[in-house]
Image (spheres, rainbow, N blue to C red):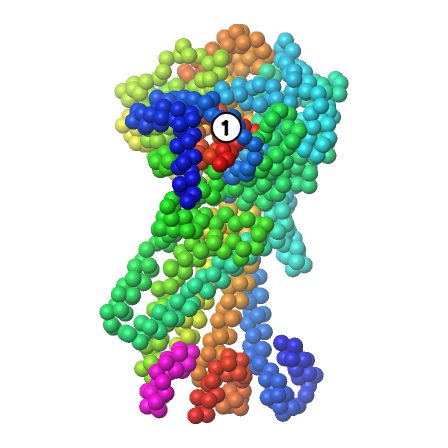
């Protein structure tokens, strides 16, 4: 990172193109950086547009936070006093500009409901959601890969059919049923393997309370598993049928090596995009698991904030979610670029010239530590 | 392992308490219909309560509450969401509720109105302390009342004590204050209205930076929307109490997950569980279900500001077509009792001479016909989802039999209480158990906090004001009896039932006794944990 920054500043000082190319070769400056920055700027624009949409949407909602906070028995004078104290009696545009100015300066405002700084409410919840996501990835990704590859290798066998049917069953069962089923299976009297409800102790690190994560992760993971496994399976089948695999087999390369080192990386692209899709849905809050297991994540927080018309909190959550989605997309696209064989195997010079979108495959093989170089040269 | 332990404990306790009797009682009550169901349940549990072994000190009690979507706060005078329940741990008041929805002295050693209830004199016990060690004096008392009634605090409950004249508050000596009312008015139900939110806090109180009171537990940690942790207050005004070392209040968003947590032993007590879960909870031998037969009413508001509800015949028809027994069975799952369109039956002033209104569809039809409706009355009932909606749907079916079409519209809570709330024609009504005058202040009194029915009756208002100025029971009884006759004849409330409050707790929890109030499970100074 440091190196690329250095190079970037050097090149911006107007060195000749040739020298720049040399430096590229030397430092392997990721040419995709400009593409990346473009995408980043685009992402920021998305964030702003979404903040505007959220604001307009909250205007359309009936009722206001003051009434909801004070409840049905509040006299009108109390409601009006609170509206004034919360700044809700100001013109809507002023409220928005106020909020935006604060947001840009890093002041995300104060939650109307709890009167705590939004960040104070949000970060622990966000961390919980991230922990949940990490758990889901750690559970689903290896399982989907192994299962997908196994099914592809044994395609159309009894095993394949049985597992596919089981996966369809998991997909077809509504998530909440899955969750409740797991609770009945693992945490009712007599079994008590895992806690039924994820009431995290905020004093402790989430990793010290991993047992609370088990059932939520299983629920979300089992719901996502069929989709990913079938993606891996089908792209694996496609890759196994391709000419280069045939050629590799003819050369007598061991099957194990063909499958795991030559075929699988090529079959990963759909899985990466599929995983990104799953994560994009979950990062805004896995509402389902959060409700069933009382897991304090982003989903229930957003739901509560909307019910309370707690605008600063809604804005912060939606924007954080947007940023996360943009980030996940960016990461998935980057991985896709790095995994795409066409980009990887093309001659570097041609790639750089051809690379109008700033995609650069250089250094991929080294970075990934995969022996593609040998395969190419072979 | 856990399972074995708790079963042994359960059996042990059962033997010690003559548990077979209790078991028999609850089994029998399971077969009976609702009316006797709750009574025998209460009786059984009461027997258990009195026969319970001596309370022991120590342990951490984990209480699961449902807080809705609000994060809530700790504000003594403006409790939001679970703030009301947390307040039971943190704060004490002049009075406390007794088990029959009356008031008894708590911090106060003397609290009496004068002859026409235009002034109250209140003196607290000597030597009382707050959590941070400060001795409670009259300045704290004045500060607390001024804070509660401060317009800038915008307390939703300020309306209850809106009669207090802030400028006339007076300190008589170090422990004594005098409260007077605006325009020299009388206000007899001060105890019942100040008791809920009139927590006594020190002059340096701040709900966020210094949330101290004189309640049984001191705050250790509060995470809004998630949980709060308290430790025992050694200088609590009741000697020997509280029993627990620590109290933890954990907030849940979902009834099902809370029941799962209770059954899995992650919490010890679930406050206010759903009647739908009663069978499941009863079947679990490690748990006990406590049914408090409260006098909280449940019914419907008829908005008298809207046609055709101005017509008393239409209102009476809507009351007559109500099959109260069916509503209790279906909307309350049998956990309740039939009501007679009147509230506060526990109040000594309640008029028991008014006959119970019968279910009479024919008379309802004839009244509607007199009012000009030939099977063509259409009404809209606006409700939030949940219990209110269930009752509304049952009621709509009943109305159909009398030729009244009730359209049930469900809106979320924020819309229901939003700016359009004045427009609802028919809406669910309920008020927690309170005395007559205090309940009226929540509903149809002339200076009610929010009069959803828009009921205004000259004679009723006169009687109400006279009752406010009448501390003596017998004359007040006469006034309220007449006021209730008016409500029964032409009021705007269809009160079909009194609902039970259900609490569920592990067998380890002691000191939980069903009562007529709604807060059996919030008396944290009584609760204790059985060890071993």
Q: Is residue A251 something one can see in this rendering?
A: yes
Closer to the camera in the image, A113 or A82: A113
Residue ID at (42%, 39%): B5
Count of numbered labels shown in the rendering:
1
**Which residue sits at x=70%, y=34%?**
B132
The residue positioned 56% from the left and 35% from the top of the image is B58
**Image position of B265 with respect to A3: above or below:** above
- Residue A256 belongs to the span the image colors magenta: yes
Taking the view exactly as shown, the residue that stands out farthest to the left is: A158
Quadrant where the N terminus of chain B sits is top left
A67 relative to B194, above or below: below
Q: Name the residue furthest top.
A: B474
Where residue B301 appears, as percent x and y from the top left, is: 43, 27
Residue B340 location (% of width, % of height): 39, 19
Task: Tell me the magenta residue range.
Answer: A243-266
Quadrant position of residue B225: top right
Question: Residue B517 versus residue A303: which sits nearer the camera?
Answer: B517
Identify the residue under disc 1.
Answer: B511
**Residue depicted at 47% across the width and 19% down the height:** B344
């Amino acid at each position: 990172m440091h190196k690329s920054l250095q190079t970037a500043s050097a090149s911006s000082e107007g060195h000749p193109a040739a020298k720049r190319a040399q430096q590229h070769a030397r430092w392997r400056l990721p040419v995709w950086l400009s593409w990346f920055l473009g995408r980043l700027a685009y992402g920021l624009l998305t964030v702003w547009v979404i903040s505007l949409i959220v604001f307009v949407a909250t205007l359309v909602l009936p009722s206001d936070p003051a009434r909801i906070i004070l409840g049905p028995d509040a006299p009108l004078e109390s409601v009006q006093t609170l509206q004034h104290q919360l700044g809700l009696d100001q013109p809507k545009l002023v409220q928005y500009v106020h909020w935006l100015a604060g947001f840009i300066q890093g002041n995300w405002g104060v939650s109307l409901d709890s009167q705590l700084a939004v960040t104070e409410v949000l970060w622990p919840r966000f961390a919980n959601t991230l922990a949940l996501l990490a758990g889901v990835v750690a559970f689903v990704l290896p399982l989907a890969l192994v299962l997908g590859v196994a099914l592809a290798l044994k395609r159309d066998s009894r095993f394949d059919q049985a597992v596919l049917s089981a996966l369809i069953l998991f997909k077809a069962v509504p998530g909440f049923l899955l969750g409740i089923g797991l609770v009945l299976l693992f945490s009712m009297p007599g079994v008590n393997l895992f806690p039924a409800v994820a009431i995290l102790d905020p004093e402790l690190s989430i990793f010290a309370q991993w047992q609370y994560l088990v059932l939520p992760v299983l629920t979300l993971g089992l719901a996502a598993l069929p989709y990913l496994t079938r993606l891996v399976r089908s792209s694996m089948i496609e890759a196994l049928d391709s000419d280069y695999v045939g050629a590799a087999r003819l050369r007598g390369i061991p099957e194990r090596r063909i499958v795991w080192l030559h075929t699988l990386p090529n079959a990963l692209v759909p899985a990466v995009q599929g995983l990104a899709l799953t994560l994009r849905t979950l990062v805004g809050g896995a509402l389902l698991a959060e409700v069933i297991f009382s897991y304090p994540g982003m989903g229930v927080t957003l739901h509560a904030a909307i019910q309370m018309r707690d605008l600063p909190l809604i804005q912060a959550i939606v924007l954080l979610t947007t940023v996360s989605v943009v980030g996940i997309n960016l990461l998935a696209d980057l991985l896709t670029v790095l995994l795409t064989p066409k980009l990887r195997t093309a001659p570097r010079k041609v790639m750089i010239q051809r690379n109008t979108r700033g995609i650069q495959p250089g250094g991929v093989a080294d970075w990934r530590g995969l022996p593609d170089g040998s395969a190419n040269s072979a | 392992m856990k399972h074995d332990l708790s079963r042994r404990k359960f059996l042990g306790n059962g033997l010690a308490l003559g548990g077979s009797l209790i078991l028999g009682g609850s089994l029998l009550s399971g077969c009976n219909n609702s009316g006797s169901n709750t009574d025998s349940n209460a009786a059984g549990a009461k027997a258990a309560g009195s026969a319970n072994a001596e309370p022991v000190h120590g342990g951490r009690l984990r209480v699961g509450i449902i807080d809705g979507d609000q994060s809530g706060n700790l504000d003594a005078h403006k409790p939001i969401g679970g703030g009301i329940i947390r307040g039971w741990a943190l704060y004490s008041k002049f009075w406390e509720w007794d088990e029959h929805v009356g008031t008894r002295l708590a911090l106060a050693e003397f609290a009496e109105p004068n002859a026409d209830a235009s002034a109250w004199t209140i003196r607290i016990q000597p030597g009382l302390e707050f959590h941070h060690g400060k001795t409670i004096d009259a300045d704290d008392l004045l500060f607390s009342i001024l804070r509660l009634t401060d317009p800038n605090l915008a307390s939703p409950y300020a309306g209850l004590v809106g009669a207090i004249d802030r400028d006339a508050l007076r300190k008589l000596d170090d422990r004594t204050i005098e409260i007077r009312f605006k325009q020299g008015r009388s206000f007899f139900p001060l105890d019942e209205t100040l008791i809920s939110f009139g927590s006594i806090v020190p002059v340096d109180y701040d709900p966020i930076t210094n949330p101290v009171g004189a309640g049984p537990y001191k705050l250790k940690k509060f995470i809004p929307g998630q949980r709060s942790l308290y430790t025992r207050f050694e200088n609590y005004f009741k000697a020997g109490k509280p029993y627990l070392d620590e109290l933890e209040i954990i907030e849940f968003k979902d009834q099902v997950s809370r029941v799962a947590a209770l059954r899995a032993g992650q919490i010890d007590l679930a406050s206010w569980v759903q009647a739908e879960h009663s069978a499941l909870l009863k079947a679990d031998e490690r748990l006990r279900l406590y049914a408090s037969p409260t006098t909280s009413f449940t019914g419907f508001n008829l908005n008298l500001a809207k046609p055709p509800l101005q017509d008393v015949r239409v209102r009476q028809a809507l009351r007559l077509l109500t099959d109260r027994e069916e509503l209790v069975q279906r909307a309350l799952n049998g956990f309740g009792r039939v009501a007679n369109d009147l509230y506060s039956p526990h109040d000594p002033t309640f008029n028991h001479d008014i006959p119970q209104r019968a279910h009479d569809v024919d008379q309802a039809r004839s009244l509607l016909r007199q009012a000009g409706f030939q099977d063509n009355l259409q009404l809209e009932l606006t409700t939030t989802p949940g219990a209110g909606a269930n009752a509304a749907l049952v009621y709509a079916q009943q109305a159909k039999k009398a030729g009244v079409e009730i359209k049930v519209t469900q809106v979320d809570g924020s819309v229901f209480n939003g700016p359009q709330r004045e427009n609802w024609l028919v809406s669910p009504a309920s008020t927690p158990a309170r005395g007559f005058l205090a309940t009226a202040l929540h509903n149809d009194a002339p200076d009610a906090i929010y009069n959803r029915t828009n009921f205004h009756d000259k004679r009723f208002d006169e009687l109400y004001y006279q009752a406010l100025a009448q501390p003596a029971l017998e004359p007040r009884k006469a006034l309220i009896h007449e006021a209730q006759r008016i409500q029964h004849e032409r009021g705007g409330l269809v009160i079909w039932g009194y609902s039970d409050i259900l609490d569920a707790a592990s067998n380890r929890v002691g000191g939980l006794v069903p009562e007529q109030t709604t807060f059996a499970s919030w008396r944290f100074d009584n609760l204790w944990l059985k060890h071993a």
